[in-house]
């Protein structure tokens, strides 16, 4: 039986690229594997796939009866709905440990680094498998994306080291320029429906029994949202109500100014204000230096729900 390698419900570049890189590794060591994705491909991810000659992984949302190697998450809220009917054989992830439970032992590679593909590179090294140039290319792009070209506080020396190694394999002379190309593509929002923007990089969380949804858009100039910010805020309210969420947030990150404006819709906005010692104005606030949902939003917001 083939193992499906697959990331979270709203896949970003790391989720899709790690599914591809992990599947190639597993096939190389004699474990038949097929990369998959649970959702649509973002413009940035499509740019990466096109750049290195890949088709998007198979779209698959049901895994009952299948073997599954999870990439880039371990929270049940980001898993397929029929997860309990699948056999989880492994997890490779760089986030906090989530609430997925299994009925049998499994392989786990979980590291406090900036990107899942950094860990997949360690797996290649462990198994002594040579990385093809095109696989190295998608891996390094995923790391550049997740670490915001090394600007994110989630970035570690290991991520930088791995990018340099992968760039040599992929034949990429200027990975910084490649990273800016990616973020330029990521910044294109003209004509995109606001709901698609909110859900482009969106993750659901259970925070002490409260349903919370957090999306993030990383761009090179926050001014591109000036004409649609009110529409984003209004639709964020709709997302919260439609999904029975306590709180919904959209993080608008300016990678050049190295900060984020956060749009908030909540049953109790005081929880967000307490978490970040701030005052929301018209449902939003600027958080200077905030680039990471994983490290600078969730660890502060989640404990507030326990009070």
Image (cartoon, helix red, strand yellow):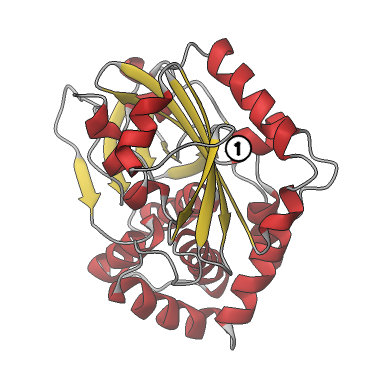
Q: Quadrant of residue 238?
A: top right
Residue in the picture at 35% in, 22% down: 86
Residue in the picture at 44% in, 16% down: 267
Q: Quadrant of residue 227?
A: top right
Left or right, 114 with reference to 106? right
223, 294: nearer the viewer: 223
Badge 1, how many Cα within 10 Å: few under 14, some, many 20+?
Answer: some
- In what element is the residue under mark 1? strand
Left or right, 2 with reference to 218? left
**Percent x, y of residue 181:** 69, 70
Residue in the picture at 32% in, 31% down: 75
37, 208: nearer the viewer: 208
Taking 53 as reference, is 105 above or below it? above
16, 149: nearer the viewer: 149
**Percent x, y of residue 226:** 75, 48
Q: Quadrant of residue 233?
A: top right
Taking 244 as reference, is 96 above or below it? below
For the C terminus, the quadrant is top left
Residue in the picture at 35% in, 64% down: 153
Taking 216 as reference, is 26 above or below it? below
Q: Which residue is mark 1?
A: 58
Q: How many marks?
A: 1
């Amino acid at each position: 039986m083939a193992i499906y390698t697959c990331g979270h419900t709203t896949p970003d570049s790391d989720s899709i690229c790690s599914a591809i890189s992990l599947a190639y590794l597993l096939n190389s060591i004699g474990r038949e594997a097929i990369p998959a994705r649970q959702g649509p491909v973002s413009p940035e991810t499509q740019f990466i796939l096109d750049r290195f000659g890949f088709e998007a992984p198979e779209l698959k949302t049901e895994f009952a009866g299948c073997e599954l190697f999870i990439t880039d998450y371990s929270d049940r809220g980001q898993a397929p709905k029929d997860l309990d009917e699948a056999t989880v054989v492994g997890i490779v992830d760089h986030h906090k440990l989530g609430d997925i439970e299994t009925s049998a032992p499994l392989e786990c590679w979980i590291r406090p680094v900036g990107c899942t593909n950094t860990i997949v590179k360690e797996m290649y090294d462990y198994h002594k498998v040579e990385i093809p140039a095109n696989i190295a290319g998608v891996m390094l792009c995923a790391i550049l994306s997740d670490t915001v070209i090394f600007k994110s506080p989630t970035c570690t020396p290991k991520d930088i080291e791995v990018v340099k190694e992968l760039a040599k394999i992929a034949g990429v002379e200027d990975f910084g320029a490649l990273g800016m190309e990616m973020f330029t593509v990521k910044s294109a929002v003209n004509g995109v429906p606001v709901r698609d923007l909110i859900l482009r990089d969106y993750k659901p969380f259970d925070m002490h029994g409260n349903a919370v949804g957090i999306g993030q858009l990383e761009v090179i100039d926050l001014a591109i949202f000036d004409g649609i910010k009110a529409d984003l805020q209004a639709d964020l309210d709709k997302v919260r109500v439609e999904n029975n969420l306590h709180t919904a947030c959209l993080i608008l990150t300016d990678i050049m100014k190295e900060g984020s404006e956060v749009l908030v819709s909540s049953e109790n906005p005081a929880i967000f204000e307490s978490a970040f010692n701030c005052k929301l104005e018209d449902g939003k606030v600027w958080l200077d230096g905030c680039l990471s949902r994983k490290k600078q939003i969730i660890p502060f917001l989640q404990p507030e729900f326990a009070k």
